């Protein structure tokens, strides 16, 4: 969060943790929002996001629907994961503040899933006015073409080295991201590569919409 600052957000996703463990991690990260400017996005758990004061909630396919989540957390920004133009349009109509679109490129965590490619991002950007965040196998060298295609930003796990604490052979869930046993500043360089790539591409004319043309949220 220190490395990203106000240009980024950290998405907390922790499916194996208990509710208490998840809350405690989220509470610690929530304290860093004000000092760093980086947003905390809580995956799925609307209750935890509300309890700790996270800036936003990211809904998955198994989560509450956008309208349902907004009824519980009307003052919290909510994003939706989408895999089609239809899903993005529906999410926007329901009040989503952004959509996370994937899987854009090949990634080991989704073996066998055909990549959607930049063309998918372009179709989404033409169909909705909420920001489109591209996810799935994104590398720093992909950022420029994604922004050119209409992406507002990118999301990454492996590209920022979050997966470096590899599980032992024989683990029953090899693709789960682990909490690396490293100092935080070891991650600054990979993260800042994305920020640098984004900044260098942002001077171009982009296909996303200025604030005045977005929904109120």
Image: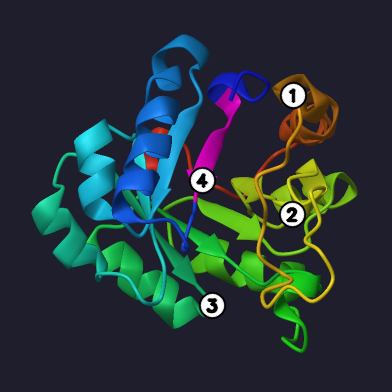
Spatial separation of the CA atoms under disc 1 and disc 4: 19 Å
* Circle number at residue 146: 2
Magenta stretch encompasses residue 68: no
Q: Locate residue 5, reporting x and y percent.
A: 59, 20
- The quarter of the image holding the N terminus is top right
Classify mark 1: helix, strand or loop.
loop
Instruction: Tell me the distance, in whole angstroms, between the alpha carbons under discs 3 and 4.
Output: 18 Å
Total marks shown come to: 4
Residue labelled with disc 3: 83
- Compared to 82, does 210 lie above or below? above
Task: Check whether the beta carbons of the residues at disc 2 and disc 3 lie within 8 A of each other.
Answer: no
Q: Which residue is mark 4?
A: 11
Q: Residues within 10 Å of mark 2 (few under 14, many from 20)?
A: many
Between marks 2 and 3, how big is the CA–CA gap? Answer: 16 Å
From the viewer's perspective, is the residue at label 1 or at label 4 nearer? 1
Q: CA distance from mark 1 to mark 2?
A: 31 Å
Residue 8 magenta: yes
* Residue 157: x %, y % from top left: 70, 51
Determine the CA span between mark 3 and mark 1. 35 Å
Binning the other alpha carbons within 10 Å of mark 1 as few (below 14), some (14 to 19) or many (20 upward) gives few
Q: Quadrant of residue 217?
A: top left
Read off the magenta span.
7-12
In this view, the mark in front (1 or 2): 1
Q: Nearer the viewer, residue 172 or 124?
A: 172
Do the CB atoms of the residues marked 3 and 1 lie less than 8 Å apart? Answer: no
Q: Quadrant of residue 96?
A: bottom left
Tell whether label 2 touches label 1 (CB within 8 Å): no
Colour mode of the rendering: rainbow
Q: At x 43% / y 43%, what residue is drawn?
A: 41
């Amino acid at each position: 969060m220190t490395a990203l600052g106000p240009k980024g957000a950290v998405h907390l996703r922790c499916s194996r943790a208990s509710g208490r463990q998840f809350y405690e991690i989220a509470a610690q990260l929530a304290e860093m929002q004000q000092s760093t400017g980086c947003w905390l996005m809580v995956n799925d758990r609307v209750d935890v996001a509300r309890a700790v004061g996270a800036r936003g909630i990211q809904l998955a396919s198994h989560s509450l629907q956008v309208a349902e989540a907004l009824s519980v957390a009307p003052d919290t920004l909510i994003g939706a994961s989408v895999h089609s133009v239809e899903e993005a349009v529906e999410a926007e109509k329901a009040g989503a503040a952004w959509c996370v679109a994937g899987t854009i490129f090949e990634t080991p965590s989704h073996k066998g899933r055909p990549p959607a490619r930049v063309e998918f991002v372009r179709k989404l950007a033409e169909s909705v006015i909420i920001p489109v965040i591209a996810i799935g196998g994104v590398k720093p060298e992909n950022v420029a073409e994604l922004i050119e295609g209409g992406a507002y930003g990118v999301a990454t796990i492996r590209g920022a080295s979050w997966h470096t604490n590899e599980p032992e052979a024989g683990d029953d869930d090899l693709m789960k991201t682990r909490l690396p046993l490293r100092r935080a500043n070891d991650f600054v360089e990979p993260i800042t590569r994305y920020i640098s790539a984004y900044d260098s591409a942002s001077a171009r004319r982009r296909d996303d919409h200025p604030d005045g043309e977005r929904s109120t949220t």
